[in-house]
Amino acid sequence: MNTPAHLIFGLTAFGKAERPAITGAAFAGALIPDLSLYVLAGWHLLLLGTSPDIVFGQLYYSAAWQSIFRIDNSFIIWGIALALAGLYRAPVMIALCGAALLHLGFDFLLHNDDARAHFWPMSNWVFQSPVSYWDPRHYGNIAGAVEVALSLLCCGILWRRYRGPWMRGLIALLGVSELAPFVLFAIMFAGP
């Protein structure tokens, strides 16, 4: 699933308009499972000048990168953290961990050959879903359209929930970020 969709769903499920710290935690929790990818890819693409084909065709699948992804994409680690947050009745940490687990749940269901080991450290097993959020060979054209539609619906919910200009600006930015690739690809592949 695209990161803007994760952010939209995390904010919808766990954000609280009257509690900015909880909303911030929901945003962070929805982002953290993808953060290592952005840091690693950004380092290679922007600072080292590595080709995108190498970054996303080789490095992404390398043992080194996958060993990092196992940590921030672990149902086990995030589940333990959520259990502790619930035990201590820490709403900010509940929002953080809940949004991260929601992110992982969607990724578990929507990643095929780019899936990760979600049950580390108990197992290095990788579930390759028959559905991909992006790959048309695995229903990505359908899953992507559903993702965009649900994201825009959630943006409408968020727009009603949050009245402040900063949050509404963020909601609009996330909605445009989610919709833009879908529209651009439709234009690019529409033909003459």
Image: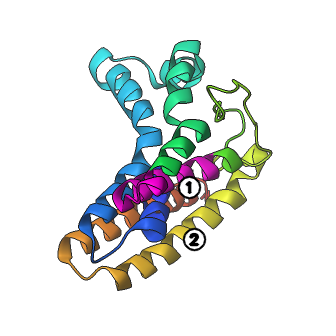
> What residue is disc 2 on?
150
Is 61 magenta? The answer is no
Q: Residue 38 or 47: which is nearer the viewer? A: 38
**Which residue is outermost to the right?**
130
The kind of residue on which mark 1 rests is Leu
> What residue is disc 1 on?
102
Q: Residue 65 or 144: which is nearer the viewer? A: 65
Image quadrant containing the C terminus: bottom right
**Helix, strand or loop at mark 2:** helix
On screen, residue 111 above or below 175:
above
Spatial distance from mark 1 to mark 2, Cα to Cα? Answer: 14 Å
Magenta segment range? Answer: 85-107
**Front of the two marks 1 and 2:** 1
Residue 91 rendering spot, x and y as whole percentages: 38, 62
| Residue at the (56%, 28%) spot, across then down | 70
**Helix, strand or loop at mark 1:** helix
- Could you classify mark 2 by the number of other residues whose Cα lies within 10 Å: few (under 14), some (14-19), or many (20 or more)? some
- Could you classify mark 1 by the number of other residues whose Cα lies within 10 Å: few (under 14), some (14-19), or many (20 or more)? some
Q: Residue 89 or 53: which is nearer the viewer? A: 89
Q: Quadrant of residue 21?
A: bottom left
